[in-house]
Amino acid sequence: MPRCHIVGVYPPPAFVDDKSIFYNALRLLSNRFLRQLPVVDSKRRVKAILTVRDVIRFINRIVSEGRSIMDALVQTDVSSVAVRPVETLIYGEFTVHDVFRVMRAKGIGALPVVSRDDRILGLVNEEHLANLIKNNSFIGMGLNVKDIMTRDIVYAPLEGTTVRDAIRLMAEGGFRHLPLVDEERRPVAIVTARDLIRFLVRGETVKLLEAGKDEEVLATPISRVARMHPVHIDASMSLQEALDFMALAGIGGILVVEDGRLAGIITDMDLVTRLPEKLGETFNKLIADIVPPCP
């Protein structure tokens, strides 16, 4: 029989006090390579959750209002930017199926795990659930990449796109991955929300922001921040092969092409939301075999 185990990470990789300044939260997200950061009070009770999407939306608002980025980062409490109220799970009182269901229904990618008095104990996010799927790729048998990929994606030309453009596109679209293409729509680079956050808090950028040179920072060509020559797969590839590849590469998103041109993307969130919808009860049975309910 499969061994019972709990999905997620305990304790959470990091959390931040609700009185902390926003700049410190950004550095924590960057240094720990995090997608989400629980926000807690002095008794470690969960009050909110900060995501990289929240960060990009906040920065975009500051830029659109013409305010100083550095002033905003050091004068804003993290609790005023983070999402609240936050959905939580009580430790020992949820199943993996519950996590899939809540994330799909609410459209969220992270759920803090708490004690009965709301104290932070752990975190479950879409990466943890997606890894269950990737590491058991027989779940995707019979499907192709095109069956679950996101087709209606926003992309931008590598040439001429700036950091300002990338922040605006991500903030307006509410996504974390921005593919960058050449004149024939072939993917040549990709920039993520985490890439932009790391750029904003690195030493050279911070010095420019402290000197009030926001425009110089925002005008930075995106090619200086993006990852060049991104891995991509064909839409006709079997989903099982794609899951094996993603697991081996340790990546949470991969671009999809048709006839060499950008056609879509598969992310961890696609696996968490679309695969259960596609497979229905079959998916529930497969997950039950992988992670049986704890007695």
Image (cartoon, helix red, strand yellow):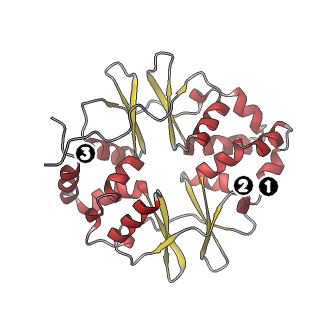
Residue under the point 83% across and 43% down? 208
Q: Residue at x 71, y 60 (%)?
A: 222
What SS does tag 1 mark? loop
From the viewer's perspective, is residue 188 above or below residue 293?
below
Q: Residues within 10 Å of mark 1 (few under 14, many from 20)?
A: some
Q: Between disc 3 and disc 1, whose residue precedes?
A: 3
Q: CA distance from mark 3 to mark 1?
A: 45 Å
Q: Position of residue 105 (x, y in %)?
A: 34, 46
At x 83%, y 50%, the residue is 216
Q: Position of residue 210 (x, y in %)?
A: 82, 36
Residue where numbered disc 2 is placed: 163
Residue 158 appears in which quarter of the rendering?
bottom right
Judging by the rendered image, the residue that carries numbered circle 1 is: 219
Q: Position of residue 58 (x, y in %)?
A: 64, 40
Looking at the image, residue 94 sits to the left or right of residue 26; the answer is left
Above or below, comparing residue 14 to residue 136 in the picture: above
Amino acid at circle 2: Val
The kind of residue on which mark 1 rests is Ala
Q: Quadrant of residue 5?
A: top left
SS of the residue under disc 2: helix
> CA separation, marks 2 and 3?
39 Å
| N-terminal-most mark, 2 or 1 | 2
Residue type (three-letter) at the residue carrying disc 3: His
Quarter location, residue 68? top right
Q: Which mark is residue 97?
A: 3
Locate the C terminus and report the quarter of the image it occupies: top left
Q: Report x, y in % for residue 226.
A: 66, 60
Q: Is residue 181 visible?
A: yes
Name the residue nearer the viewer: 115 or 270. Answer: 115
User: How much space separates mark 2 and mark 1, taking CA atoms?
Assistant: 6 Å
Whether residues under marks 2 and 1 lie with C-beta atoms below 8 angstroms apart, the answer is yes
Left or right: 27, with 142 as reference point: right
